[in-house]
């Protein structure tokens, strides 16, 4: 067990009770009486219908800004200990300084002035703040205001189906599985992993200052804190929700973490399920609005039905990398075939032509279509007259003018992809064994590819 980083573990029922009690101290907190929380072995905690109905626009849950974690609320809480922190839109007039004058944050938060905070991204600030309040503050026997929220966060092990962690965590058992991911998924995971490392470099010096302030007998090692940081990083990434944060211009900074709302799971038909609604008229002293989830066009009336939220139109590759799960049926699946197409177009003159016209790379296939970029690239492969291909680009010719060569190249390409996909499915099943959720997820991605390819091959004349 790591020094100073683990506290006594409460039962799930107690943690849930504490969370509700903490939220209930805010007048505007609401949970629809028709729903209840349940833990499912496959999708974790989720919200289900207990009785009655949830109709369109009916509130499922409402969380005031005082109980959300975002750039504004974190800055506000830091300013309680460091009066040098103040931002527009965060009303610090009614600040009640904490009663305990010995609270270590009076000195430790001095390193976070307005300029430092302003230069941190929302991700950096939240991960730094949560790391300190959740994992380090207990070393001074001090309890964070946010403890009831932290206590219901997923454990590190519950996040181990996220591929970036297979490469970041040296103890991960999935390094071999990582090699079997499709290339676009691997690239996505590597992008996230390097973002984690870059953000750690930015916040690490603050962590080190605070760590050395901990009494030696309780002081955790820097490696252990890095592991906590990567845990927190993926908690934030898999649970953040879009909200306008006026203090931040970048869209990546505009998010909030909302207790209870973050228990809602996703489905690909989610456009009919629940949607978020932010009441920005009720900004409160933290500057951002009350966050609600309201019913969508689907009426919930079956007891036990899961209440779902729209995470967005995401493919299985995306869901796996950002959230650590996949869906057996996902209408947003597509295959990024750029590396394979680029291998087929081996003639440097054709490559140059496509690059000059802005048609080199980003080739995709979904169930509804083979991307126009790919059709153009294959037309350039089969037709030596590149002026004719230009006419296709500008819509003066249709792809039919390049048949039968274009059609046969496409069929050959799709059949070969299908063969590779199916052999990948067989080797994952054979070599790695089943029963592991991460194996199931990788299989699901390839099964999704296989369905798309078969659909196009049986559709071909
Ligand atoms: C916002 S949280 C939802 C609550 C989560 N189930 C929990 O136990 O805390 C997002 C996480 O829920 C899980 N999840 C969401 N939708 C899912 C689904 N359809 N199938 C499996 N897991 C899902 C994934 O682990 C994802 O990272």
Image (cartoon, rainbow, N blue to C red):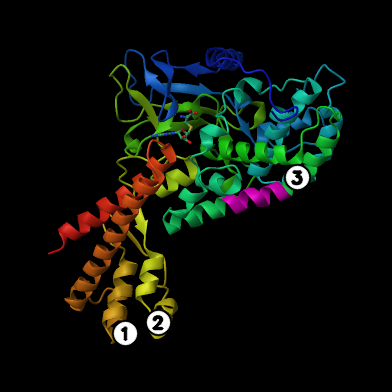
Give the quarter the ligand 1 occupies: top left
Percent of width and height locating residue 426? 31, 51
Percent of width and height locating residue 318? 44, 48
Residue range (magenta): 193-201
Crowding around mark 1 (Cα neighbors within 10 Å: few <14, some 14 to 19, many 20+) is some
Can residue 136 be seen in the rendering of this structure?
yes
Q: Residue at x 87, y 20 (%)?
A: 101
Judge by depth and name the residue closer to the eye, 404 or 179. Answer: 179
Labels 1 and 3: the sequence-earlier one: 3
Label 1, on which residue?
386
Instruction: Give the Cα distance between marks 1 and 3.
Output: 54 Å
Q: Residue at x 38, y 22 (%)?
A: 58
Label 3, on which residue?
204
Percent of width and height locating residue 242? 52, 39
- Depth check, mark 1 against mark 3: the one in front is 3
Q: Are marks 2 and 1 in contact (CB under 8 Å)?
A: yes
- In the rendering, which numbered label is found on residue 366? none
Q: In the image, is residue 121 above or below residue 159? A: below
Instruction: Give the Cα distance between marks 3 and 2.
Output: 46 Å
Q: Are marks 3 and 2 in contact (CB under 8 Å)?
A: no
In the image, taking residue 412 as reference, residue 47 lies left or right, namely right
Number of numbered labels in the structure image: 3
Percent of width and height locating residue 67? 61, 24
């Amino acid at each position: 067990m790591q020094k100073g980083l683990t506290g006594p573990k409460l039962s799930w029922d107690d943690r849930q009770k504490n969370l509700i009690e903490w939220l209930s101290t805010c007048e505007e907190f609401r949970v629809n009486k028709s729903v209840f929380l349940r833990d499912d072995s496959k999708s974790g905690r989720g919200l289900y219908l207990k009785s009655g109905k949830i109709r369109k626009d009916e509130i499922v849950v409402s969380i005031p800004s005082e109980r959300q974690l975002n750039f504004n609320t974190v800055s506000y809480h830091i300013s309680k200990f460091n009066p040098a922190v103040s931002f527009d839109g965060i009303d610090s007039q009614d600040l009640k300084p904490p009663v305990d004058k010995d609270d270590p944050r009076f000195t430790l938060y001095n390193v976070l002035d307005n300029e430092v905070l302003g230069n941190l991204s929302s991700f950096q600030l939240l991960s730094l703040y949560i790391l300190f309040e959740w994992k380090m503050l207990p070393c001074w026997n001090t309890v964070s205001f946010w403890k009831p929220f932290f206590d219901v966060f997923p454990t590190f092990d519950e996040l181990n189906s996220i591929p970036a962690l297979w490469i970041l965590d040296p103890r991960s058992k999935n390094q071999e599985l990582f090699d079997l991911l499709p290339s676009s998924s691997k690239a996505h995971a590597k992008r996230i992993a390097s973002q984690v490392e870059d953000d750690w470099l930015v916040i690490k010096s603050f962590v080190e200052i605070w760590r050395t302030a901990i009494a030696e007998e309780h002081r955790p090692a820097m490696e252990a804190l890095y592991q906590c940081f990567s845990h927190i990083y993926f908690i934030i990434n898999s649970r953040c929700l879009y909200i306008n944060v006026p203090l931040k211009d970048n869209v990546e900074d505009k998010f909030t973490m909302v207790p209870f709302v973050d228990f809602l799971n996703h489905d690909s038909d989610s456009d009919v399920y629940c949607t978020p609604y932010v009441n920005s008229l009720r900004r409160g002293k933290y500057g951002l609005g009350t966050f609600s989830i309201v019913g969508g066009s689907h009426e919930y009336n079956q007891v036990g039905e899961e209440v779902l939220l729209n995470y967005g139109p995401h493919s299985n590759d995306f869901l796996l990398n950002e959230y650590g799960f996949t869906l057996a049926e996902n209408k947003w699946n597509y295959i990024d075939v750029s590396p394979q197409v680029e291998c087929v177009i081996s003639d440097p003159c054709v490559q140059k032509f496509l690059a000059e016209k802005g048609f080199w790379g980003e080739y995709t296939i979904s169930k509804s279509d083979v991307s126009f970029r790919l059709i153009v690239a294959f037309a350039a492969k089969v037709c030596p007259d590149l002026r004719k291909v230009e006419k296709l680009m500008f819509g003066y010719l249709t792809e039919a003018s390049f048949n039968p060569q274009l059609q046969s190249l496409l069929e050959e390409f799709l059949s070969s992809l299908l063969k590779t996909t199916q052999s990948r499915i067989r080797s994952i099943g054979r070599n790695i064994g089943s029963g592991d959720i991460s194996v199931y997820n990788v299989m699901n991605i390839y099964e999704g590819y296989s369905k798309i390819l078969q659909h196009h091959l049986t559709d071909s004349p």
